[in-house]
Amino acid sequence: MRHGESEANAAAVFAGQTDSPLTPKGREQAKVVARALRPVHFDRVVASTLSRTTDTAAEIAAGRGIPVETYADLREIDLGDAAGKPFDELNALPSYTSDGFTQWPGGESLDQVVARAMGVIDRLVAESPGKTICIVGHGGVTRILVSGFMGVLPKLIRVPATNTNITIVTHDERGYVVQEMFKDTHVVEIA
């Protein structure tokens, strides 16, 4: 799932791998998604090392008796030249097309993101066969991984992905299968 609203999200700027904390609204969103997920048994709760994911994951893990595990390789994509820039400046970046980038100028390629994030996910799955793992991550990485699971990379699936949206992926003999994508029915507008 994606983290709650960060300061960068609220300001409509690209955060990338900078540590942009949750806003008060993001903290409320984390509580709302934690309540929505309360009926789901998780064997592990995992997050990137950025505070917006660890703080969201802490809400989900609260009362479950399991720690939040963190992995640097689950961090958001390195946006290079776009980091810290407003969303509306995206079109001014070199080589941008409506399909997006295969590599952010000065940052990571899609292949690099897939390699590092899948290294962690494959390891978690191998360590926990048949278990349910909640991974609190980032919008960009989730979109890239889901696009890969669905076989459309380097194009990216471009449906809206609100903060704290949930994507359900299973793993079996076929590999990774997307069951639900960017589900946000639990999201409520928080003033």
Image: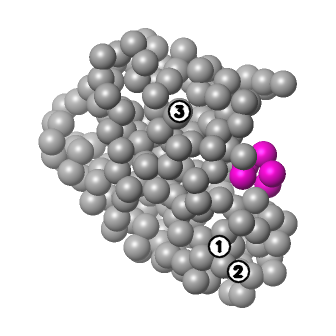
Residue 79 in the figure: left or right of residue 176: right
Q: Nearer the viewer, mark 3 or mark 2?
A: 3
At 54% from the left and 61% from the top, the residue drawn is 17
The amino acid sitting under disc 3 is Thr
| Dot 1: element | loop
Q: Nearer the viewer, mark 3 or mark 1?
A: 3
Q: CA separation, marks 3 and 1? A: 28 Å
Residue 171 in the figure: left or right of residue 181: left
Q: How many marks?
A: 3
Q: CA separation, marks 2 and 1? A: 6 Å
The amino acid sitting under disc 2 is Tyr
Q: CA separation, marks 3 and 2? A: 31 Å
Q: Residues within 10 Å of mark 3 (few under 14, many from 20)?
A: many
Q: Which residue is mark 1?
A: 100
Q: Is residue 182 magenta?
A: no
Residue 174 in the figure: left or right of residue 32: left
Q: Earlier in the sequence, mark 3 or mark 2?
A: 3
Horizontal and vertical percent position of residue 127 = 15, 42
At 71% from the left and 79% from the top, the residue drawn is 97
Horizontal and vertical percent position of residue 100 = 65, 73
At 76% from the left and 59% from the top, the residue drawn is 13
Q: What number is the disc on residue 96?
A: 2
| Dot 3: element | helix
Using the rendered view, name the quadrant where residue 178 is placed. Answer: top left
For residue 175, above or below residue 151: above
Magenta-drawn segment:
8-12
Q: Residues within 10 Å of mark 1 (few under 14, many from 20)?
A: some
